[in-house]
Image (cartoon, rainbow, N blue to C red):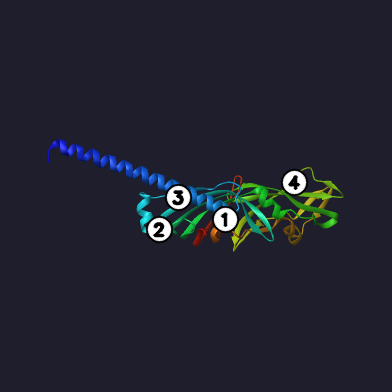
Amino acid sequence: MSKRAIRILLIVVVVLGGLFVAADRFAVSFAENEAAEKLKNQEGLSSTPDVSIKGFPFLTQVIGGKLDDVEISMKDYDAKSDGDTIRVAELDATMHGVDFSGDYSSATADRAAGVARISYDELLKAAESEPVELPLGATGKVVGLSDGGDGKIKVAIEVSKGGTKLPKPVHVLSSVSVEGDTIRVHADKIPRKLEVLGLNIPLPEGLVRDVTDFEEKVSDLPGGIRLDTVQAAPDGVDVAVKGENVDLVS
């Protein structure tokens, strides 16, 4: 084969390769958009989620009927919580081994893992209640949650007596954990007494824990994924989620 023929062959290969890459990227973009719209409608989201199909080439994965990995990011998802809802500020998950139908109307992942972020303001709703009666006519209630460092949550408790509030809230550091579909907040240590308006008020542990300790159920996450572990973060809690045979679109 002459040098000229080799050059022509190389040019043809490069052009065909470029066309294949362009077609592959167009196809993956179309599939991502279709999946995102279906996911938005299925989950009743206010905004369209981001769907990113990983792996190259995409078209060979389509021929095989299975995608390697699909990354999903959605915002402001309303999960269920004891007859009410709790807003998940952001949910990022990676789906591994995704089987899909030809028209992308259904897709199921072998397994999934990700992180759901819940703000402190949203988690505070679970702690808000009527003030709890303490000794000597005092009352206490949780009025704020924040990052306590080292994986702890700082719980702010407002104490009042006779309608007069303490100038500053009382703070306790609490551990956060997951049990089943429930996030639990448990004070590591509680004060034994408190000075209010010149009175030393004893604080029985059981009564104080009625104020400090609370839980929040989080269920009905997309595709049947479930809570795994939880960690306190600067703006809220990061909940690790996981699942098997997850319905991405159905």
Per the rendering, the mark at residue 17 is: none
**Along the viewing direction, whichever of 131 and 83 lies nearer the viewer:** 83
- Distance, label 3 to label 1, CA atoms, is 16 Å
Q: In the drawing, does residue 169 fall left or right of residue 114?
A: right
Neighbours of disc 2 within 10 Å: few (<14), some (14-19), many (20+): some
User: Which residue was labeled with disc 1?
Assistant: 42
**Along the viewing direction, whichever of 12 and 134 lies nearer the viewer:** 12
- Distance, label 3 to label 4, CA atoms, is 52 Å
Q: In the drawing, does residue 170 fall left or right of residue 31?
A: right
At label 3, the amino acid type is Ala
Q: Secondary structure at mark 1?
A: helix
Residue at left offset 17%, top offset 39%: 6
Tell me where residue 122 appears, x and y as whole percent.
67, 50
User: Which residue was labeled with disc 3?
Assistant: 31
Residue 197 seen from this side: no
Residues at discs 2 and 4 in contact (Cβ within 8 Å):
no
- Distance, label 3 to label 2, CA atoms, is 13 Å
Q: Secondary structure at mark 3?
A: helix
In the image, residue 166 above or below residue 61: above
**Could you tell which of marks 3 and 1 lies nearer the N-terminus?**
3
At label 1, the amino acid type is Gln
Tell me where residue 137 appears, x and y as whole percent.
85, 55
User: Which residue was labeled with disc 2?
Assistant: 66
User: Which residue was labeled with disc 4?
Assistant: 169
- Distance, label 2 to label 4, CA atoms, is 55 Å
Neighbours of disc 3 within 10 Å: few (<14), some (14-19), many (20+): some
Residues at discs 3 and 4 in contact (Cβ within 8 Å):
no
**Along the viewing direction, whichever of 235 and 10 lies nearer the viewer:** 10
At label 2, the amino acid type is Lys
